[in-house]
Image (cartoon, rainbow, N blue to C red):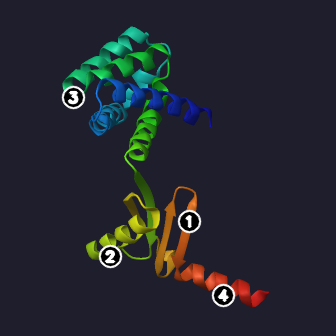
Amino acid sequence: MLSHTIAHRYAKGLLEAVNAVAPGQESIVQEQLSALVDTVQGHDGLHLLVINPSIPVQQKQAILGKIAETLGVNDVIKRFINVVADKKRLDHLALMAETYQKLVEEQQGIVRAEVATSTPLNPGQVAQLESSLRQATGAEVRISRRTDPELLGGVVTRIGDVVYDGSLRGHLERIRERLEK
């Protein structure tokens, strides 16, 4: 839980800095920060070097600065990385990037929905589901999909902490509960 608190604090600070220095660039900063994190996470040796407390902060900053330069990231991100390194919080960088993305989406009125179905949805079904969720939430919806053969049929949707169970399995369980009473 502490990791999430730390990540939220830094991500919020980054978003405030971007809003002040480069308004309208929030999504671009998010993409660039994700690219930087993916580069670091994608190379085991680099990831271990960045989180190793025995490596001097200046060396970490230099390495991450070179990567940032190669990727062509925004100056706000370069300064952010230096602050995170100075505070010895680079081990939270991936979570910070994830949290920053959520904060940007929240600011833009975008809601994430996790959808589970028994079989993959076709593009028409995805569009229809997005439309229904957009009407239900009053916000732009981004769907992440997964298949779960145990559902038998139907859809289970999670938006934040709320779960909408429209699965056949869920209906059968509710019928069983009613019959048992």
Instruction: Give the labeled residue for mark 4.
Output: 175
What amino acid type is highlighted by mark number 1? Val
Q: Position of residue 90 (x, y in %)?
A: 45, 24
Q: Residue at x 25, y 25 (%)?
A: 74
Decide if residue 175 is on the left or right side of residue 51. right
Report the Cα–Cα distance between label 3 and label 2. Answer: 37 Å
Q: Residue at x 52, y 77 (%)?
A: 166
Q: Nearer the viewer, residue 77 or 137?
A: 137
Asked whether disc 4 touches disc 3, contact meaning CB atoms under 8 Å apart, the reply is no
Element carrying mark 1: strand
Residue 125: mark: 2
Mark 4 crowdedness (10 Å alpha carbons): few <14, some 14-19, many ≥20 = few
Q: Position of residue 55 (x, y in %)?
A: 44, 13
Report the Cα–Cα distance between label 1 and label 2. Answer: 19 Å
Q: Position of residue 155 (x, y in %)?
A: 47, 75
Of callouts 4 and 1, the N-terminal one: 1
What amino acid type is highlighted by mark number 3? Leu
Report the Cα–Cα distance between label 1 and label 3. Answer: 39 Å
Of callouts 2 and 4, the N-terminal one: 2
Decide if residue 132 is on the left or right side of residue 53. left
Instruction: Give the labeled residue for mark 1.
Output: 163
Element carrying mark 3: helix
What amino acid type is highlighted by mark number 2? Gln
What amino acid type is highlighted by mark number 4? Ile
Q: Position of residue 100 (x, y in %)?
A: 42, 37
Asked whether disc 1 touches disc 2, contact meaning CB atoms under 8 Å apart, the reply is no
Q: Is residue 14 above or below residue 154?
A: above
> Where is residue 176, by image quadrant?
bottom right
Report the Cα–Cα distance between label 4 and label 1. Answer: 18 Å
Element carrying mark 2: helix
Of callouts 1 and 2, the N-terminal one: 2
